Image (spheres, grey):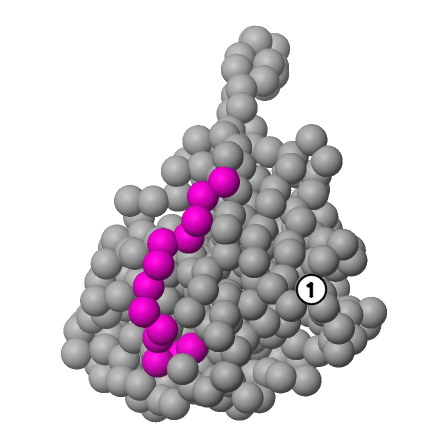
Amino acid sequence: MTRTAPSSEVSVEQARYNSPDPSIDLLPALTDEGLESIHQVDSRNQYGMDQLINIVDELPLTIKVDGEELVTLMTLGSQPELLVLGYLRNQALFEHPGQIKSVKVNWDRELAEVVTRNGKGLQGFDTSRRTVTTGCGQGTILSCTLDKLYEHRLPKTTLRQSEIYEVLNRVKDYNKAYRAAGSVHGCGLCQAGEVLVFVEDVGRHNAMDTISGEMWINNMPGHDKIFYTTGRLTSEIVMKSALMGIPVLVSRNGTTNMGYELAVELGVTLIARAKSRQFCALNAENMIFDASPPIPPHMQSGQQNPH
């Protein structure tokens, strides 16, 4: 079954490319091959008793662009077309979705076929050199992505502490696959305390790419959004956030030194170790502390907990 992405006006972010390409007003045709990702299997518990448990899929999906193989992703398969679009966007391979004519997913062949409007595929891009990143499912960064990365430095935006608490409170209502079966990461696109999109996948980078694809075809800007993830704030996640135009990343996990250094260079605020009313804000000179909890006695006396 084939669906056409919803039409929309050209966004400010698309217009900034100032492209003479008439395809900027067009959107790709997408198949609709999302799969149910949770299954029940027999198991035995610690008491030797038989029981059914839920497990999630982990499926290979090879992306080909105009017949040329690009990469194989391991995914739940719940929204493969958006995953493919977001991956292409977050590798800086296309400037706008109108450059892509169609994305056709065929699970029997474990294949996503991308057809471009000019038929030139990835001509002019060096896709041979890749960095394998950390994390579940393992992501990849192409050398051509790094070449374009610093074109996406973000301006600082004001961030309120209360917004972080609103996001943390809202995302508790999601994580459907994780609650049922575990083994997945979740990512949410948030604005004004609301979760606009929430995606789960075997790797946080896949979930992030899927949201990026959703934003791309629906003309959603990133400058006024907050991105939540259950995974670590590594360099790859910071890169993707900058490419999506999102200035704030929130995670219940920590960050890495490279992730932090990139965040400073690219203008991304990191909210790490965010649980309940606790967090560590990095590169956060833009933050307004409008909902600070009472300071515990041990911190009032000048002592700090390194954990």
Disc 1 residue crowd, few under 14, some 14–19, many 20+, Cα 10 Å? some
State which quadrant residue 269 falls in: bottom left
Q: Residue furthest front?
A: 22
Left or right: 70 as drawn, with respect to 245: right
Where is residue 155? Give x, y as percent: 38, 90
Where is residue 262? Give x, y as percent: 56, 83
The residue lying toward the viewer, choosing from 80 and 106, is 106
Rendered view: 146 above or below 169 = below
Q: Is residue 9 magenta?
A: yes
The residue lying toward the viewer, choosing from 7 and 276, is 7
Q: Taking the image as drawn, is residue 15 in sight?
A: yes
Q: Residue furthest top?
A: 49
Write the residue at 42% across / 60% down: 217
Where is residue 9? Give x, y as percent: 32, 69
Left or right: 12 as drawn, with respect to 231: left
Write the residue at 57% across / 9% down: 50
State which quadrant residue 180 falls in: top left
**Mark 1 highlights which residue?**
119
Left or right: 266 as drawn, with respect to 218: right
The residue lying toward the viewer, choosing from 218 and 289, is 218
Rendered view: 169 above or below 249 = above
- Boundaries of the magenta span: 2-14
Where is residue 33? Give x, y as percent: 53, 37
Left or right: 60 as drawn, with respect to 236: right
Q: Taking the image as drawn, is residue 220 in sight?
A: no
Write the residue at 31% across / 48% down: 172
State which quadrant residue 252 falls in: bottom left
What amino acid type should be assigned to the residue bearing mark 1?
A: Gly
Write the residue at 42% across / 69% down: 25
Q: Residue furthest right?
A: 128
Query: In this figure, what is the number of numbered marks?
Result: 1
